[in-house]
Image (tube, grey):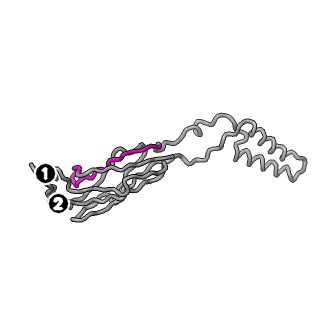
């Protein structure tokens, strides 16, 4: 519970029956991040160490939430909440992004290369010697499979679609520390750069 007086803010923790009073205009905790910026590729996780320092005897549980995250990114605090019992405590903030689908897609070959590929594979299969026929057919099968020699048309709708991912860019993320009752007690920002 948070009570706002004329000059003071009193925070009362109903679970442990402790009270902390802080002068109005100041925060019962200070939150700092180290580092304050990170640069990662889409699909990776950036980690920040948050130091939560109490003032005025504050010793209630503190949890953290994030706003301003890029699309398809999540924010997790480990542990989920911390209690600064008169001294600073640390927690790890993880900002996880979503990467591109790692499915293997066959490259498109220009018509001339595709024709040469088929010609080479077919000539190996029909060179007139039985030992080369089996090798040539095998090679042709491998080439068709690996290089996509028999393709050349547009990709299927499945191959053309791309999975959703966190897009490249710079985001300023607001990290909000809240007291046990959900009242905001301090905010700080971290900067996240996502590259491809």
At 27% from the left edge and 53% from the top edge, which residue is drawn? 177
- The front one of 166 and 87 is 87
x, y (%) of residue 102?
Answer: 56, 48
> Which residue is the extreme one toward the right?
128
Start and end of the magenta stretch? 168-184
- Give the side of residue 138 with respect to residue 129, left or right: left
Disc 1 target residue: 3
At 24% from the left edge and 65% from the top edge, which residue is drawn? 87
Residue 174 within the magenta-colored segment of the rendering = yes
Mark 1 and mark 2 lie on one chain; the one further toward the N terminus is: 1
At 41% from the left edge and 44% from the top edge, which residue is drawn? 70
Image mark for residue 159: none
Residue 12 within the magenta-colored segment of the rendering = no
x, y (%) of residue 150?
Answer: 73, 39
Q: Callout 2: few (<14), some (14-19), or many (20+) C-alpha neighbours within 10 Å?
A: some
Q: Depth-wise, is mark 1 or mark 2 nearer the camera?
A: 2
Disc 2 target residue: 56
Q: Is residue 10 above or below residue 112?
A: below
């Amino acid at each position: 519970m948070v009570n706002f007086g004329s000059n003071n803010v009193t925070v009362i923790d109903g679970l442990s029956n402790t009270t902390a009073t802080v002068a109005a205009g100041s925060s019962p905790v200070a939150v700092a991040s180290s580092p304050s910026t990170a640069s990662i590729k889409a699909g990776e996780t950036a980690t920040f160490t948050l130091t939560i320092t109490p003032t005025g005897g504050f010793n209630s549980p503190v949890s953290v939430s994030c706003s301003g995250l890029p699309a398809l990114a999540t924010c997790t605090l480990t542990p989920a909440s911390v209690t600064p019992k008169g001294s600073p405590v640390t927690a790890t903030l993880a900002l996880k992004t979503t990467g591109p689908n790692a499915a293997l897609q066959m490259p498109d070959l220009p018509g001339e290369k595709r024709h040469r590929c088929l010609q080479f594979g077919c000539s190996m299969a029909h060179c007139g010697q039985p030992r080369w026929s089996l090798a040539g057919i095998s090679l042709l099968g491998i080439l068709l499979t690996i290089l996509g020699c028999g393709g050349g048309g547009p990709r299927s709708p499945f191959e053309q679609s791309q999975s959703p991912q966190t897009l490249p860019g710079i985001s300023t993320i607001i990290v909000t520390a809240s007291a046990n009752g959900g009242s905001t007690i301090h905010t700080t920002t971290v900067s996240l750069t996502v590259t491809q």
